[in-house]
Amino acid sequence: MSKDIQKMIELAIDKYKDFHREGRLPTYIPALSEANPEDIGVYVSDIEGNNYYAGAYEKKFTIQSISKIITLALAIMDNGVEDVFSKVGFEPTGGSFNSILEMEKSDSPKPFNPMINAGAILVTSTIKGKSNAEKISRIVDFYRKLTGNAHLTMDNKVYTSEKETGHRNRAMTYYMKDAKIIQGDAEEILDLYFQQCSILVNCRDLARIANVFANDGVIAGTGEEVIPQNIVKKVRTLMVTCGMYDASGEFAVRVGLPAKSGVGGGIMALAPQKMGIGIYGPALEGKGNSVVGMKVLEELSKELNLSIF
Ligand code: DON
């Protein structure tokens, strides 16, 4: 089996290496447009402790929206399920990740779910800490624990680039401020969100985080529970319904795994009780998901019969 997975990853990379041409590098955060669209990396980490990897699996990129999963788990651990979901909903929007429209159109100003930017910014605002510095250090420490990588840092160039150009996120944060559904200083909340999105990871880091979510919140091989199982199950469910934004329906049919994408080109996916998968391919389709990442995941899911449905 092990040799098969290794071979499969290598074959999938070879098969889909030209598919980046169907996508584009994001330009709305200017620093992200400097990535190499030809890079593809894959890392699979199963809960028995076996690892399989190929391509640009060590290349670092910013975690971007994949951070929404991890910060959501931390926010629920900080505040409880009821409190977090009194502020943010559960429903997919069918709209883009940075849409502001739904909040104003619906009866309640509450963001539809924690995966779209508005919901994620709100979730980040609930992280406990006396100052922004304490909050970001709690967030980074949590990411370090999940990845087992004590050296995780931020990409300052991407952080500054997004801070300078993130006017849409700024607009939705002030909208939520006006609607009185977000507490605290809007600029500080945005700063925390931009910092969390700029954390640098590679495919191995993503596969390890996914592995913890696959293993019901326990770091495989250690027995250490870092996220309570009931929280893991809620987050995994939101990954299925909203993790790939307005492509979540098609992704569920084609791949059938809880997953979360980021505009840095990463996708983190997991097969419960089996494995975590981290993929990198920076060219994105129109909905903000890695084109190559989705193709490789479809192939792996089919070949390894991973779909949860
Ligand atoms: O807030 C933003 O727009 C980015 N920092 C993150 C968006 C993102 O990764 C969407 N994912 N595919």
Image: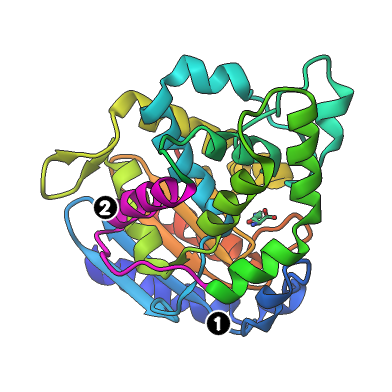
Residue 45 picture quarter = bottom left
Looking at the magenta stretch, what is its main secondary structure?
A: helix
Residue 39 is marked as: 1
Q: Tag 1: Cα neighbours inside 10 Å, few (<14), some, or many (≥20)? A: some
Q: Viewer-proximal residue, 224 or 15?
A: 224
Relative to 240, say whether 206 is above or below.
below
Q: Are marks 2 and 1 in contact (CB under 8 Å)?
A: no
Relative to 76, say whether 283 is above or below.
below
Q: Which residue is drawn at 36% across and 53% down?
A: 143
Q: Name the residue under label 2.
A: 145
Where is ligand 1, by quadrant?
A: bottom right
Q: Is residue 166 magenta?
A: no
Q: Horizontal and vertical percent for residue 23?
A: 74, 71
Residue 214 picture quarter = top left
Looking at the picture, which amino acid does disc 1 mark? Answer: Asp
Q: Is residue 148 magenta?
A: yes
The residue tagged with tag 1: helix, strand or loop?
loop
Is residue 56 visible to us here? yes
Looking at the picture, which amino acid does disc 2 mark? Answer: Lys
Q: What stretch is highlighted in magenta?
A: 132-155
Q: Which of marks 2 and 1 is nearer the N terminus?
A: 1
Q: Horizontal and vertical percent for residue 181?
A: 69, 23
Q: Which residue is drawn at 72% across and 22% down?
A: 180
* Residue located farthest toward the left when viewing the structure as drawn: 222
Q: Horizontal and vertical percent for residue 224?
A: 15, 41
